[in-house]
Amino acid sequence: MTDPADLRVTLVDGYVDEPAHFGVPPYISTYPRFTAGAMVDAGVPEEQITYHTIDELRDDRRKWADVADADLFVYIGGMTVPGSYVGGTPAEPDEVKELAWTADGTTLMGGPIRFGVGEENAGGQDMERKDLDYDFVAKGDVEAAAYDLVDSGLEGFGNRMRDNEELDRWAAKGAFVVEQHPNHPHYLICEMETSRGCAYRCSFCTEPLYGNPSFRTADSVVKEVGNLYNRGARHFRLGRQADILAFGGDGEAPNPDALRRLYGGIREVAPDLGTLHLDNMNPITIARWPEESRECIRIIAEHNTPGDTAAFGLESADPVVQEENNLNVSADECFEAVKIVNEEGGWRPGEDPADAPTFGDEAASRLPKLLPGINLLHGLMGEREETFAHNKRFLHRVYDEGLMVRRINIRQVMAFDGTEMSSTGSQIAKEHKKLFKKYKREVREEIDRPMLKRVAPPGTVLENVHLEYHQDGTTFGRQLGTYPLLVGIPGERELGRTVDAAIVDYGYRSVTGVPHPLDVNTASMDELTAIPGLGRSKAGDVIVNRPYESADDVDDALAKFVSVGDGDVGSAD
């Protein structure tokens, strides 16, 4: 029997993406942290656990030696929703198998990959359960499997789910893993679990496979945040739950007191945090308990950081699709929920919350505190041509009523065993592929661009934009947070650093920005011509007439983008 104290463990993060869980960089999911904590709890010393991301292994083949030489190799991954990613590339099935073949020791695979594997990480396909040549596959919780496997001397485990008492220990003990992430500490956001499971049973969703809602206590989550904060983490996302409003309650009704303890506690243990965002909020909760939900939303908006998004799982505005797939919210109910979140969270720092929602020229130059996001899913049972028209009408209604949504997520179903959609599979999505592409393009053109301008009017300042890549002479970056805006800044700038940017123009899903504050005495022609209302001719005049000493000497179009201090244009605020 192998003594846990003698084990050398390598844990590889192939990334996860679930309906209520992000894990592709710059996010780090809960799975590697909980699994590492479980093994420490079973007796493995922290210093004998090595953590790598799949991108690290791609970039440096020498790190594969840590996989080969480990007594226990643990792979964590799995995509149950399709997505496109900038910060990392999820592991493909062939890579997962290669890791198993490389490892000389015992191998364990777990995470949402247990629900199934497709030919690629994309929507509109069927998913099949495969072991991918691992010695052990955790059909329950990978952290529970890792604990039991270590505790048994690597002889085996029974597939089981962990309980909250175990999670309290493992979450706290596994915080050290973040220090080994290549993005630590500046460009890493920790996904936090407040609960899992769901009270509802939508046809496509894997979240109900975790059972009915099981909530952690506020103290447990706060303690984990404190441990991560002490390890250098400054960015947190309460994303691992089906409905943040139901935290600490019966799984359906809101519980303002529990949310107050959760958010207030986080602010106490992480006083200098950079990001505090969330993800899932069930619109049916708001529709059924509007006053209690309003109080909860006010609590969140008081404690969070700007740009936060509450994802709404409308999935379809078509009543036929809603009925056939057991979707729990109607289009009218979802509209009312959008309105309530706008009224309680649609204000910006420096404004009176009572004025929400705010937008236009008079709005403060920051993103709103909390806005809804809309999830739309295609390929569901009962989908027809009219389904696409229903969805577009709903989105136009939201816009025409002067409301805001932070983003519209349009995707195609992935059909997993254990869900009702497994009997239908991806056939409907494949049949409607051409219609889906046309509809998606129309939504981007008719809704996304004008909505972006409403959410982030010209001159809105995005602080701490992390510069990620170059393309066609432009540098692209994002803030840390839930569904951050992709910002293109003219010119090729040093990657890996952060800048503040003021928004000047809009794409369908991204924006153009210039550095803020803009120093007109050094600004490039591309930066100046990007500013609304300036134009190439006036930008040329600005350059010819440099240097400037006073803001009064600068074109009025620059007013929102130029900082004046001590009489010098371009000095810091």
Image (cartoon, grey):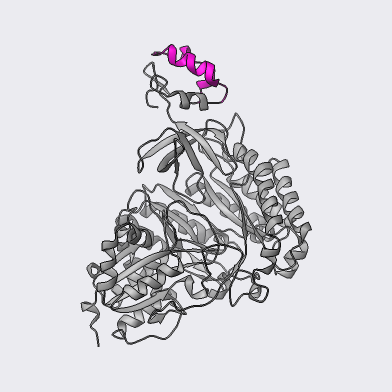
Q: Whole-percent x and y of residue 102?
A: 32, 73
- Res 179 seen here: yes
Q: Most extreme residue toward the left, as rendered?
A: 6
Relative horizontal placement of residue 57, taking residue 214 as reference (left or right) = left
Q: Whole-percent x and y of residue 134?
A: 39, 79
- Is the C terminus in the top left, top right, bottom left or bottom right quadrant? top left
Relative horizontal placement of residue 509, taking residue 37 as reference (left or right) = right
From this view, report whether residue 101 is shown above or below residue 513.
below
From this view, report whether residue 438 is shown above or below residue 383.
above
- Res 169 seen here: no
From this view, report whether residue 273 is shown above or below residue 248.
above
Q: Is residue 61 magenta?
A: no
Q: Residue at x 73, y 56 (%)?
A: 331
> Of residues 157 and 125, which is closer to you in this image?
125
Q: Whole-percent x and y of residue 475?
A: 43, 38
Q: Is residue 549 magenta?
A: yes
For the record, the magenta segment spans 532-560
> Of residues 426 and 330, which is closer to you in this image?
426
Q: Whole-percent x and y of residue 253?
A: 61, 64
Relative horizontal placement of residue 131, taking residue 395 as reference (left or right) = left
> Of residues 457 and 294, which is closer to you in this image?
457
- Is the N terminus in the top left, top right, bottom left or bottom right quadrant? bottom left
From this view, report whether residue 518 is shown above or below residue 341.
above
**Could you say which quadrant of the image residue 209 lies in?**
bottom right
Relative horizontal placement of residue 175, taking residue 23 as reference (left or right) = left
Q: How many marks?
A: 0
